[in-house]
Amino acid sequence: MKAVIFDLDDTLYPEHTYVRSGFRAVAAWCERTLGLSAEEAYRVLDDSFRRGLRGNAFDLLLEHFAQPPRHVGEMVRVYRDHRPSIDPFPGVRAAVAQVGDRYRTGLITDGYADVQRRKLDALGLAPLLDAVVFSDDLGRACWKPAPQPFMRALELLDVDPPEAVYVGDNPAKDFLGARRAGLSSIQIRWPEAEYAEQPPPTPEHAPDRTVGQLGDLVRILLP
């Protein structure tokens, strides 16, 4: 093995912290622009998220305050454009640095490229990585599980597929994409991650190995 490539969301940091960081930015905007209570706005947004209503949380917030739905577009912009207050999972920074002492390291992440760049900047992990691929830069059709972002990462790291392993969390797309590109894969199942208990939809979507703790991952990568 010559390279380890990581996913970002719910692999290197807890994604729910980004969501709540964005909700705080939107709540502050509501107070500045609409004269609403930021504290109450955040409480309503967080309650929607806890109930699994993330997709229409802003609509529900405006309904709660009897505000017109025309504000949703601006709220989405504030959410996506905010500088997030997020941190890596405990031990991740040291683990990525340790892995990087032996192997080339990379990252592949889906999502709007500007949003993902701000996440990576806020986490401060970019200096530990030899290559970063924002799949959105390749086109929406190249989001995982498409093989293109994996092939691009291999190209940047100058390694062949059998020489790399991909570490991710989401069985719906991470490991199928890696398999299509010829990489082996490891799923890390952080207890607070969204997909920790989600089974792979088909055997082809399954990772080659699964770990539940960062220490187990490091022991596999650094035997």
Image: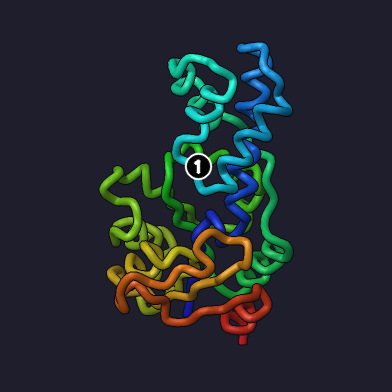
Position of residue 139 measured from the top left corner of the image (x, y, whole percent): 29, 43
The C terminus sits in image quarter? bottom right
Q: How many marks?
A: 1
Residue 82 appears in the figure = yes
Q: Nearer the viewer, residue 129 or 71?
A: 71
For the question of whether residue 160 can be seen, the reply is no
Q: In the current view of this chain or complex, which residue is farthest to the bottom? A: 223
Residue 44: image quadrant is top right
* Disc 1 element: helix
Image point (58%, 51%), residue name: 15
Q: Which residue is mark 1?
A: 54
Residue displayed at 48% across by 17% down: 71
Q: In this image, 25 relative to 73: left or right? A: right
- Vertical position of residue 9 compared to residue 104: above or below: above
Q: Quadrant of residue 149?
A: bottom left
Query: Relative to residue 115, is residue 215 depicted above or below?
Result: below
Amino acid of disc 1:
Arg
**Residue 92, position as x, y percentages in the image:** 67, 63
Image coords of residue 83 (percent x, y): 62, 33
Identify the image quadrant of residue 175.
Answer: bottom left
Residue 50 screen position, x and y as percent: 59, 48
Q: Residue at x 65, y 75 (%)?
A: 213
Q: Is residue 80 left or right of residue 155?
A: right
Tell me which colouring the rendered structure shows.
rainbow
For this view, does 161 lie left or right of residue 168?
left
Classify 42 as above or below 146: above
Q: Residues within 10 Å of mark 1 (few under 14, many from 20)?
A: some
* Position above or below: 122 against 96: above
**Which residue is at a point 60% across and 59% down the rendered structure image?**
12
